Amino acid sequence: MASVEIPVPPPVRWICDVLRGSGYQAFVVGGGVRDALLGRPVHDWDVATDAPPDAVQRLFPRTVPTGIEFGTVTVIIDSQAVQVTTFRSEGGYRDARHPGWVTFGQRIEDDLKRRDLTVNALAYDPASGRFVDPYGGQADLANRIIRTVGHPVERFQEDALRLMRAVRLAAELGFRLDGRTAAGIRCCAPRLERVSRERVGEEWRRLLAAPDAGRGLMLLYRTRLLPWVLPGAPKLERVAVRRTVAGLERLAPRGAAPTMAARLSRAAPPRAGPGPAPARRC
């Protein structure tokens, strides 16, 4: 993908300018960069910096310490909220979701290393127009591939919600799963049981609202995630999944798919029931 200038909104650019003017690095990162490169609307802009959280709080008049133990401070400008997070490394994931330790750093490359997917491990400097892309995220965007940063099993063992996020993003963007990434999802699928039903349900509803919801549903089935998304449902046979996928695909051109998606989304029980038999160890 050719290098392009990203239209960073003035409030976000101003935050980066203030940080840079105070001697710190500042990049827009993650999903905002991804969506801007794809020409999609960007709903949330995130900034990464080597400024420690207390410095961010001193530099801006209106802030909220939304996740200060993880280095995240929300900066409020007019009605816009922008999350500013200190470069960090992390590890010791204690609950299949959250890191047990966080170390603040000085290099954007180290911060990108902890990201889930290559298409999210992108940073952009609004001042210079420079991209930082150590894992080939721009190439994966161009080739329409969802791939993990580093070894898939390691990424999914750190945070099991990434299992759902990878499939949901493939459905939203119309991308395909990299082979090793798909194999890693199948291997780690039982870990989804450790994620709260609320977070799983949020990803489930977003997947069903995606333009390619039928394909997303089939990806859930093929990666063995579907029984863990709907643990209280009867055994899901391939033919039933195919019929549901076909229904979503027929309804999509008429704009009726969201109605069906809403009905399907309510199928997810509020509490996890007995899941399928554990898969083999990765």
Image (cartoon, helix red, strand yellow):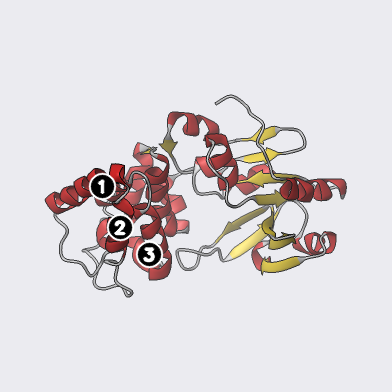
Q: Does dot 1 land on a helix, a strand or a loop?
A: helix
Q: Is residue 115 left or right of residue 156?
A: right
Amino acid bearing label 2: Thr
Mark 2 or mark 3, whichever is nearer to me: 2
Q: Total label count? A: 3
- The residue located at (29%, 51%) in the rendering is 256
Q: What residue would you read off at disc 3?
A: 201
> Which of marks 3 and 2 precedes in the sequence?
3
Which residue occupies the extreme front position in the image? 254
Can you give x and y, in whole percent of width and height, for residue 83 in the image?
66, 57
Mark 1 or mark 3, whichever is nearer to me: 1
Q: What residue would you read off at disc 1?
A: 251
Residue 212 against residue 165 in the figure, above or below: above
Q: Is residue 237 left or right of residue 111?
A: left
Image disc number at residue 213: none
Can you give x and y, in whole percent of width and height, for residue 8 in the image?
68, 42
Quarter placement of the N terminus: top right
Q: Does dot 2 land on a helix, a strand or a loop?
A: helix
Mark 3 crowdedness (10 Å alpha carbons): few <14, some 14-19, many ≥20: many
